[in-house]
Image (tube, grey):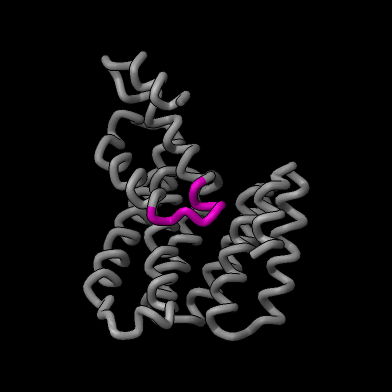
Amino acid sequence: LYKNWLMSQTQESNRPSLFYESLELVALFLFGHYERAVAIGKACTEKLAMLWSARNSRLILLFYGLARSGNLLRNLNDPRSLAEDFTTETKDTIEELRRFVGMMEDWSVVSDVNYRCWSRLLDAQIAELSTDHGQAVQHYEEALDHAAEHDFIFEEALGNYLMAGFVVRRKARRSARAALQEAIGLYRQIAASGVAKTIEDE
């Protein structure tokens, strides 16, 4: 309802709705609505230039990229999808994620404090989709170290959750449990109790 009202009030510019949708993407991804996040993220990236130098433009790249890879990984690991061929979709997703990482790194030339964790999380998705599991672990560790060093609690929670999903898919459930417990604790630390409960229920 609020989004409809916002769009009706800003016919001359899409910037307010883009800012809103950048945050909507985060919520959709965190609560597992990947397909909806992909649809919104795709539309947002087509209007990304309207945000100019706003950090939210890279937030869109991060969560659209995570939603794309999350949706693909969900399908790849679904027993009902074994007969389907995801080769083309995997290749397209990897190429798009690499482009997003490049766009983040372009903004990190002077200082990578704001975007290093984000780009490494996308690098980890690329590595997993490329079946380079050792490289994926390395990217997750680098992302988590960067987040911890700079007190980015949300990013550290997100990184632990993503890494837990990765190790679950590798059948390493004990390692996944430790990462999930860490993610839940960090989300509770920033009062994201709904996300923490969703992880616990899942």
Which of the two residues, 14 or 145, is positioned nearer the viewer here?
A: 14
Q: How many marks?
A: 0
- Residue 77 at x, y percent in the picture: 44, 78
Specify the quadrant of the image occupied by residue 180: bottom right
- In magenta segment, residue 72: no
Prevalent SS, magenta region: helix
Q: Residue at position x 25%, y 66% from top?
A: 92
Report the quarter where the N terminus lies. Answer: top left
- Relative depth, front residue between 169 and 52: 169
Name the quadrant containing residue 147: bottom right
Residue at the farthest left position: 88
Which quadrant would the C terminus be assigned to in this image?
bottom right
* Above or below: residue 80 compared with residue 143: below
**Which corner quadrant of the image does residue 52 belong to?**
top left
Picture layout, residue 154 above or below residue 168: above
Tell me residue 126's x, y (percent). Answer: 39, 69
Q: Residue at x 52, y 68 (%)?
A: 139
In the image, residue 118 lies at what x, y percent? 50, 53
Return the residue nearer the eye: 123 or 80. Answer: 80
Magenta stretch: includes residue 34:
yes
Does residue 24 appear left or right of residue 98 in this picture?
right
User: Relative to residue 113, is residue 46 drawn left or right?
Assistant: left
Name the residue: 39% across, 24% down: 4
Rendered residue at 44%/47% (across/down): 108
Above or below — where is 62 with respect to 43? below
Give the x, y percent position of residue 81.
35, 79
| Magenta stretch bounds | 28-35
